[in-house]
Amino acid sequence: MILVTGSAGFIGANFVLDWLARHDEAVIGLDKLTYAGNLESLASVKNDPRHIFVHGDIGDAELTGQLLKQYRPRAIVNFAAESHVDRSIHGPEEFIQTNIVGTFHLLEAVRTYWSVLTDEEKTGFRFLHVSTDEVYGSLAKDEPAFGETHRYEPNSPYSASKAASDHLVRAYHHTYGLPVLTTNCSNNYGPYHFPEKLIPLMIVNALAGKPLPVYGDGQQIRDWLYVKDHCSAIRCVLEKGTPGEVYNVGGWNEKANLDIVHTVCALLDELSPRTDGKSYREQIAFVTDRPGHDRRYAIDARKIECELDWKPAETFETGIRKTVQWYLDNRDWVSNVQSGSYRQWLEKNYAGRGR
Ligand code: NAD
Ligand code: TYD
């Protein structure tokens, strides 16, 4: 079996669902169930005998040590993290605790477990660390996309904490020989995405008749990948990747934020038109920019494509249509995550941003 941390979050839940749809191999999910963790996303596999869910913290080495001893997974996929840049600006401490200290404790528990495996089990074992393109910093308009050897230049507390965790993972390979793999992926979108991030926030706010807050001039560029393509890339790296190597994952899909918002509005105009006949674009509101806002991210995905023969299945056009349709079809999931703490976050992040 495999151990998946952060399994109740956006990408972790998609990964578990896709894994169980494709494999007979069991999954143990470990998640602290922070505001971003949602067991409803895993409701369809709740009673699946191949799925065990454990509520806990990657920083709790006693718990992870006991889980490893009991279930003896052949691989770990580490998604668990604090993941939202804006939250890291308002309060970086949780990011340091989970992304750096938590990853360190997890690595220590894994090292202890791995060091007493048989030689064959040791060689076959994998620790796959899921990271982000944000560790590479921000690109100017005409600079080439991030390759795996691009220098680390994180600019937000979030990306700095992910960069630190990447370095720890790398060090555990070089120092102890732990068979690690690291993936650095671009921005994901798709089902089960918490509506604090750009795409789900725009869909949810549009349908609720609320403003669509675009930071600054809306010309910041992100490289978007449908979440299920990220999951297929992780399965591919887990199966075929070389221990100690880093693989950048992306879909060659650079888009300015304002273009993303226009696309979401156009799809909603088609699939769920406003009753007054106007376009959802009318709800766009330019607001004060994010401090230290990275201008452009772009991933050079040639290594994973050429060495591991991976390719995304979705184009941006097919992926975004599926995503908008999913939010239209799953309004209960959306309303259930809009708890009191979600509303408090919106007040905190968007208060005083009006222009
Ligand atoms: P998310 O915030 O939706 O989910 C994170 C999950 O981790 C949540 O379920 C949360 O409860 C859990 N968690 C947080 N702290 C924990 C702890 N101490 N112990 C155990 N569980 C804990 O994030 P996501 O978008 O699913 O991202 C998953 C991973 O992928 C992160 O490591 C992130 O850095 C990385 N990543 C995300 C993107 C993206 O666009 N979302 C892109 C590239 C990489
Ligand atoms: P986000 O989804 O938070 O991902 P990240 O910061 O990790 O790239 O934001 C994506 C882009 O959208 C980023 O440039 C910030 C911008 N953005 C807005 O313009 N308005 C918003 O309300 C949010 C949440 C993000």
Image: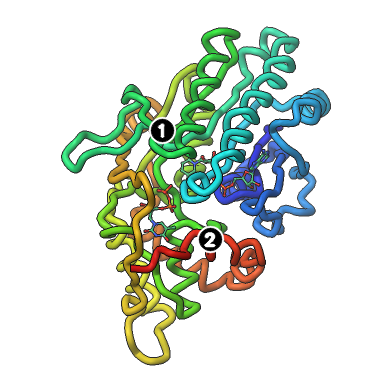
Pointer 2 with pointer 1, Cβ within 8 A: no
Disc 2 target residue: 348
Note whether ligand 2 is within 8 Å of mark 2: no
Q: In the picture provided, is 43 more to the left or to the right than 296?
A: right
Q: Amino acid at mark 1?
A: Val
Q: Residues within 10 Å of mark 1 (few under 14, many from 20)?
A: many
Disc 1 target residue: 135
At horizontal 26% and vertical 59% (from top left) the residue drawn is 217
Q: In the picture provided, is 147 more to the left or to the right than 181?
A: left
Location of residue 27 by image quarter: top right
Location of residue 263 by image quarter: bottom left
At horizontal 54% and vertical 20% (from top left) the residue drawn is 168
The image's mark for residue 171 is none
Residue 321 in the image: x percent, y percent? Answer: 40, 65
At horizontal 39% and vertical 42% (from top left) the residue drawn is 186
Q: In the picture provided, is 120 more to the left or to the right than 149?
A: right
| Ligand number 2: quarter of image | bottom left
Note whether ligand 1 is within 8 Å of mark 1: no
Residue 154 in the image: x percent, y percent? Answer: 39, 33
Above-or-below relation of 115 to 38: above
Quadrant including the N terminus: top right
